Amino acid sequence: MDGSAQGRLCSGMRQLLVADCAQLVNQSFLEEQICAVGLADLKERSPGVYGPATLRCIVAEGGLAQQPEQLASALVHLSRLRIRSYLELGIFSGFTSTLISTYLRRFAPPSSQFHGLAVDVTLQYLSRETRALLHHNSVTAELRRRPLHLAAASRHEHLDLCFIDGDHHARGVLDDFIEFAPSCRLCMFHDIVDFDVAMMTADEGVPRFWASATANLPSSAYVEFVQQPGRYPASLGLGLILRPELALARAQPWETNSTKPMLYQKVRASIPVIDYFGAERRRAHGRGR
């Protein structure tokens, strides 16, 4: 097997395409495929961000910025939801887009053709080889334009799943959610419990957005994939909102001033607030893989 980043991604894609039905819903099998593709070396994050059991999976080039157990669990859940169309916002190198779209294609209803959009403010980190793999999955890579959801809706009518992983500020995530939710049956978010994101963004980032978006939702309206094997404090985390329109209507507003417990505020005050997750710095530091 080609040990390059592209070789690992292509091999992982091939394994998902030839896997039988039992393997595709076997979480351990999926975790192994994610590990084989490789986990991105997130140097800007806390050591051991993926947990001690996954250190062998970290690679110097390419890879996924995903905790294998969290992503595998999310994929198994998504396999039951008859997803025919997919949009990912914040693709960076396109590894996550390629893996997820490959998996979802296996479960698309036979009467429909799976298709999708892979969107970011720049495509300079998307290699020609990865773009070709996305094309094989009927996923088109596009630069972000506002309002993008109108173009997406006109071409695809309604998107089954939107994975929002762009700007990691709470306000930025909310703006993206407001823009895309009208065109999306399901919305998924990354870093919903991530301690580093909360500490390194000025407004506590995706974790604050997620708390606000789900505060007044019934438990049947969202699902969290936040397994933390041997990891403290919490890292990454995927959240799936099953009823975006209800979440928009019921989202709990947040104040500008922090509402964190005093101890949390003291911890945060003891370190510099480095805006790693803004639109510009996110690209420079490799967010949204």
Image (cartoon, grey):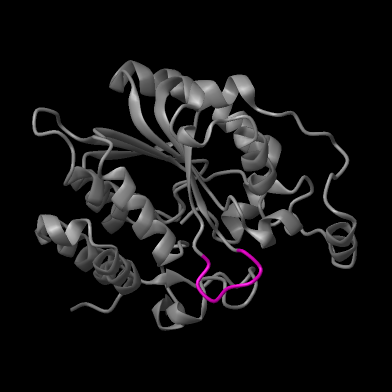
Seen as rendered, the residue at the extreme front is 219
Rendering quarter of residue 186: top left
Residue 137 locus on image (x, y percent): 21, 45
Q: Residue at x 18, y 47 (%)?
A: 136
Residue 147 visible (yes or no):
no
Q: Give the range drawn in magenta.
A: 228-234
Residue 25 locus on image (x, y percent): 22, 56
* 227 in relation to 103, above or below: below
Instruction: Kindly report the secondary structure that dominates the magenta region of the rendered protein.
Output: loop
Q: Which residue is drawn at 33% across and 71% down?
A: 5
Query: Image check: 174 left or right of 103?
Result: right
Using the image as rendered, state which of residue 95 and residue 17 is in the foreground: 17
The N terminus lies in quadrant: bottom left
Q: Which residue is drawn at 55% across and 59% down?
A: 236
* 59 in relation to 13, above or below: below
Using the image as rendered, state which of residue 7 and residue 198 is in the foreground: 198
Q: Residue at x 89, y 67 (%)?
A: 270
Query: Image check: 16 left or right of 63?
Result: left
Using the image as rendered, state which of residue 284 and residue 27 is in the foreground: 27
Residue 95 locus on image (x, y percent): 36, 58
Query: Image check: 260 left or right of 55?
Result: right
On whether residue 263 falls in the magenta region, the answer is no
Query: Image check: 85 left or right of 69?
Result: left
Residue 189 visible (yes or no):
yes
Rendering quarter of residue 156: top left
On whether residue 231 falls in the magenta region, the answer is yes
Q: How many labels does the image show?
A: 0
Residue 129 locus on image (x, y percent): 27, 58
